[in-house]
Image: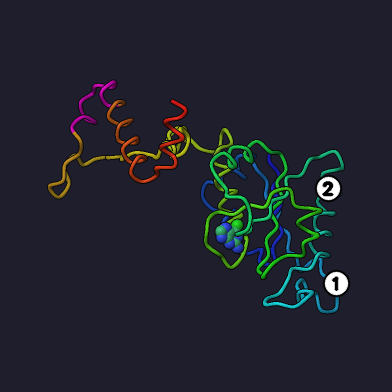
Amino acid sequence: MMQVYFLTPFPEMVTAVLSESILGRAVKKGVAAFHIKNLFDYADPPHYRIDDYPFGGGAGMILKPEPVFRAVDDIKNVVGDNTKLRVLFPTPDGELFSHENAVELSKESHLVFISGHYKGIDQRIRENLVTDEVSIGDFVLTGGELPGLIMLDAAIRLIPGVLNSYESAETDSFTEHLLDGPHYTRPEKYRGIGSPKVLLSGNHKKIEDWKKIQREEKTKIRRPDLWEKYKSLE
Ligand code: 6GU
C-alpha cells in the first residue's frame, strides 16, 4: 500500500479532494493511505507562526524551516530509517511534471508532499529534505495543494487495481506519445448529427486503423512536440 503524506497549512483543502471519487476509492481498496499533516501543529507557541520575512528583504513571506523539518522527522520516526522517502515540493520553478513522472511516482511506496502558500520556502528545506521540485506548467498558483493533488491523482490512477476496466489507463493521452482520439456513444444520430460509420461497421481492423489515424492527426496539429517524439520511436 502506498503511504502518502501531505504537509500543508490548509489540510481541509487536501482532505476534500482525497476523500472523493477515484482517490477515495483507492483508500477503500487499500491501495493507498493518505496522512494529512497541518504545518501549524509543528510551529512554536505562543504565536504558531510558520512564515516570516525574507532575509535580505524583498516582497512576500517565506515558509520557516522548523515546522517542515519537524513534520518530516515525525514521518521518519513512523516509517523508520531504512525507508526511502520521495519528498516532492510543488513549485513553479520546478521541473515540468509529465506522464513519465506519474508512472515513476505510482511505483513508490512512500510519498511526501510539502506545500506552502508563500512567496517561497526556506532554501534549507529544498536542499536538505526535498528530493523533487516539480511544476505543473508555466503559470503561477496560490499554493502547492492543487498541483500536489494533481500529481497524486495522475500517479494513483496508474496503480494496478485503482481503475476498473471501463476507466482503463491503457489508451490515455501520452501513453504512446499520442493524444487520445474522439469517442462516440448512443444515440447514433443526435440532433441530426451522426456518428462515424466505421465505428458501427463491426470491422475491428478498420476501426483500429481509423482510431489510430484520428489520434495521429490530432497529435500532429495540436502537439507537434509529441508528434516528433512519436515518429522518432516508430
Ligand atoms: Cl507546482 N505550484 C505553484 N504554486 N504554482 C504552479 C505550480 C506549482 N506549477 C505551476 N504553477
Give me the residue at 41% from left, 37% from top: 227
Q: Which residue is mark 2?
A: 78
Q: Which range of residues does the magenta coloring cover?
A: 197-207
Q: Quadrant of residue 19?
A: bottom right
Name the element at disc 2.
helix
Label of residue 44 in the image? 1
Which amino acid is tagged 1? Asp
Image x and y of residue 28, in percent: 61, 44
Name the element at disc 1.
loop
Q: Quadrant of residue 123?
A: bottom right
Give me the residue at 79% from left, 68% from top: 64
Q: Is residue 58 above or below residue 106?
A: below
Q: Is residue 214 above or below residue 56?
A: above
Q: Colour scheme used in the picture?
A: rainbow
Give me the residue at 56% from left, 65% from top: 141
Give me the residue at 55% from left, 52% from top: 150
Label of residue 24 in the image? none
Which amino acid is tagged 2? Val
Which quarter of the figure is the N terminus placed in?
Answer: top right
Mark 1–mark 2 distance (CA, rounded to whole Å)? 22 Å
